[in-house]
Image (cartoon, rainbow, N blue to C red):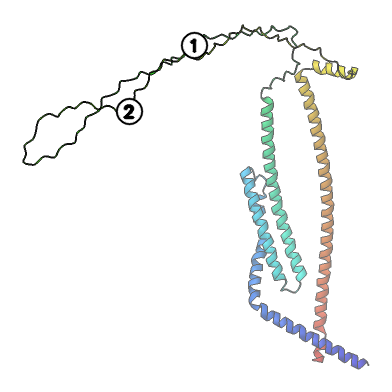
Amino acid sequence: MTTASNAWRRCAVGLLCCTLFAAAGSAAARTAEEKAAIEARAEAAQRVLEDTRFYEEWGKPGRIRTAKDADEAIRRGNDALDDVDAAFEDVKDACMLRFLVNSCIGDAKKLSNERQREIRSVIVTAEELKRSIRTRSIEERRAKAESAPKKAPLDIRPKEVKKERPEPMRIAPKTVKEKKAPLDVAPKSVKAPSEPVDWKPREPREASAPIDWTPKEVREPSAPSGLKPKEVREPSVPTGIEPKRVKPASEPTGLEPKSVKTPSAPAFAPKAEDKAEKDVDAAASPEARRAELERANEAYYEAKQAEAARRLEEAEARAQKRREEREAHQKKLEKSLEERVEAQKRYEESQKNKDSGLAKFF
């Protein structure tokens, strides 16, 4: 029973090793041409991850002085972050071809985090400078507005009620125009009938006959064909249009002025405290009132600043705690990785010093 089980175990191990060797050989054959390109990209990416020139150039104190410098630093910092991310991906692809994959990726990730931390510190410094420039501009505008002459307060006193009765309106009567003369409707003048025209056709003459220069015979005018002249009627009497009656001027209408009502009493009697406060407010000058409002605004602003400082301290404390936890976790991972590397080395040494049962089987 033991011999059969050992034989089956050896067969299984042999098949597994053959499968692994075949897969490794096919993978090596498939990636042989790509491996050189991946390694070349990984070398260039490793140089990018180890490059600290950006921080050395822009991280110096006083390097970023103007808003233009801040914009340039932010733009170049974002480009550098993109380069670091791309370089980490190239190194990660190369690590997949090596023996200790996790260790290789961890080292690349560590370098990537260091570069990103340096670049982001420069970007934060540039943004703080731009924010301080904007704050300074706002404070200058505010100081300019405070130094400008203040406008006089609005006069909100109630209108004065006139007690004198206004005089009634004087309305002049309408003027009566003079009556126009009636229209002249005389009949048209009738002209005498014109004499009829005597027309006689020309007789044809012979070409050889001499021209007859005798005058034409004047005949008596013929009577017109039944056209009687118009009868001239006597002019008609104008129709009886009576002139408008002129009414006497009307008296002005009695427009009485509106009666001025006495002001109504308030719905609720004012309290003594409200009256005292109103008297104090009325007695206080606009400058005193403005100073009181400014003191209230400053107190509110200081309270908000204190609250913001408290929240900032709490955030920094939480960030410090998380940073310490990350560092402890990183140290633990590095220690575990060193232990695994040492164990791997010990295992390889032990395998070199003793013969393998698999070699005997084959």
For the residues marked 1 and 2, what is the alpha-carbon distance in whole angstroms? 45 Å
* Number of the front mark, 1 or 2: 2
Name above or below for residue 27 compared with residue 300: below
Q: Residues within 10 Å of mark 2 (few under 14, many from 20)?
A: few
Q: Earlier in the sequence, mark 1 or mark 2?
A: 1
Residue 50 in view, yes or no: no
Residue found 81% across the figure and 28% down from its top: 296
Determine which quarter of the picture holds residue 146.
Answer: top right
Image coords of residue 158 (percent x, y): 76, 16
Quadrant containing the N terminus is bottom right
Asked whether, in this view, residue 270 is left or right of residue 62, the answer is right
Asked whether, in this view, residue 254 is left or right of residue 187, the answer is right
Residue found 81% across the figure and 32% down from its top: 300
Name above or below for residue 200 compared with residue 88: above
Residue found 74% across the figure and 65% down from its top: 107
Residue found 73% across the figure and 81% down from its top: 24
**Cβ–Cβ under 8 Å for marks 1 and 2:** no
Amino acid type of disc 2? Gly
Amino acid type of disc 1? Lys
Quadrant containing the C terminus is bottom right
Image coords of residue 281 (percent x, y): 81, 18
- Disc sitting over residue 31 in the figure: none
Image coords of residue 311 (percent x, y): 83, 43
- Residue at the spot of label 1: 180
Residue 349 in view, yes or no: yes
Decide which of 55, 203 is in the foreground and name it: 203
Q: Which element carries disc 2, helix, strand or loop?
A: loop
Q: Residues within 10 Å of mark 1 (few under 14, many from 20)?
A: few
Image coords of residue 205 (percent x, y): 11, 39
- Disc sitting over residue 226 in the figure: 2
